[in-house]
Amino acid sequence: MRILIVKLSAIGDIVHTLPALAVIRQGLPEAEIDWVVETSAAEILRGNPLIANLIEINTKDLRQRKTARGILAGLRQHSELIRSRNYDAAIDFQGLIKSALITRLSGAPLCFGFSRENLREPAAAIFYNHRINTGNQINIIESNIRLAAEALRLDIPADIEFPIFPDNSHLSEAEDIAAAAGGHFAILNPGGGWPTKIWDAGRFGRLADLIFERLQLRSVLTYGPGEENLAKQAAEACSSGSMLTVSPGLRALYSLCRKAEIFIGGDTGPTHIAVAAGTPVVGIFGPTDWIRNGSPFAEDVVVERNDIDCRENCYRRSCGEWICMDIDVETVFSAVKRRLQAKENFRTRVINANAEAQARSRN
């Protein structure tokens, strides 16, 4: 059986779909599973033995196209390659018109997607011949798993697995950073994708001071392309000199997270990578919903403003108020202490599940 997963971007969304990949592989060990992804978000999937073919495409120009016809014209160059694989089923985990079109253009006789009420762009539903209602008010990881399981009639396992496969270069990069940080460290990530998701970078610097002074942990501040100014602001605000600033690749970050005592960040790809690595997480959330986008593990902690009335179904990328991320450093530090107290059993459970998934992939 040949199956196509359609999940184009972004990094966090890719990570949220990895457990569905694990469910498909576990339930259909002989299936050939391909994944179509935007090149800009593909790094976390490269080298993954659960994927037969990683089809990288560039849909940057599609963002300027507002109609299905325009998007279709832009996808024409990719469609022949995708159709040549003769898929039996294609599953769209993205829920956008462009991803639904790719699902249909795959030529698979079975095209699965979310039902209209679960879609970010409800018009995408017209391109599926099978629509699945996965329910509301659940974590997107669980929703993706339900979509895969119901589409392919698979059992849902008890444990959530995130199949990410760093190579020796990523492991070595993480080892070097961990050694430079003294072996025991917290990871702080000030990025956020949208401006409204970003907690003040200077507060990350002051948080690093508290973590060092009260918990005797150094902080490794991680950042990605375009986030250099955030990293600089955080470093300048750290008066203790306890912060190490690095910009690892995504799979090196995953390896680094597996060594960290705790990870603190907003609703962004690195935070979701930390969840996948089994790192204890404190999420700082504003315009987005922790129940949907945050960690699926009950032990992880969210810090958010529940004393304001403008956050329900917000998801704004710009805002005139911008008060939901106005959270003081002591509040976040208290969450860090609370999360550290409950970490050991959780960390062992998630890392063991990931190790078992990787062992199965090698057999």
Image (spheres, rainbow, N blue to C red):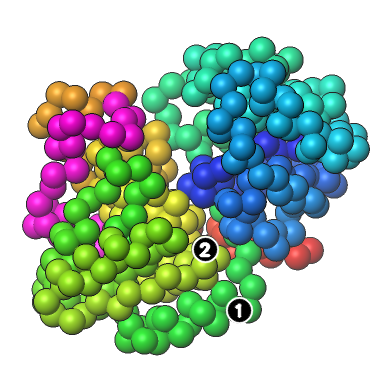
Taking the magenta stretch, the answer to whether it contains residue 320 is: yes
**From what the image shows, is residue 185 above or below residue 350?**
below
Residue named by callout 2? 250
**Span colored in magenta:** 314-340
Side (left or right) of 171 relative to 45: left
In this rendered view, identify the residue nearer to me: 339 or 70: 70
Q: Quadrant of the N terminus?
A: top right
Q: Amino acid at mark 2?
A: Leu
Q: Secondary structure at mark 2?
A: helix
Q: Position of residue 244 (x, y in %)?
A: 30, 78
Examine the rendered structure and indicate whether residue 191 appears above or below residue 363: above
Q: Determine which quarter of the picture holds residue 225.
A: bottom left
Q: CA distance from mark 1 to mark 2?
A: 12 Å
The C terminus is located in which quarter? bottom right
Q: Determine contact: label 1, label 2, CB under 8 Å.
A: no
Q: From what the image shows, is residue 174 above or below residue 160?
A: below
Q: Can you see residue 143? A: yes
Q: Is residue 295 magenta?
A: no
Between 16 and 42, the one lying in front of the other is 42
Disc 1 packing (10 Å; few <14; some 14–19; many ≥20):
few
Decide which of 161, 306 is in the foreground and name it.
306
Looking at the image, residue 321 sits to the left or right of residue 16; the answer is left
Question: What is the quadrant of residue 86 in the picture?
Answer: top right
N-terminal of the two: label 1 or label 2? 1
Q: Position of residue 105 (x, y in %)?
A: 79, 27
Location of mark 1 (residue): 169
Disc 1 residue type? Ser
In the rendered image, is residue 334 in sight?
Answer: no
> Looking at the image, which residue is at 60% across and 68% down?
166
Residue placed at 75% from the left, 65% from the top? Answer: 362
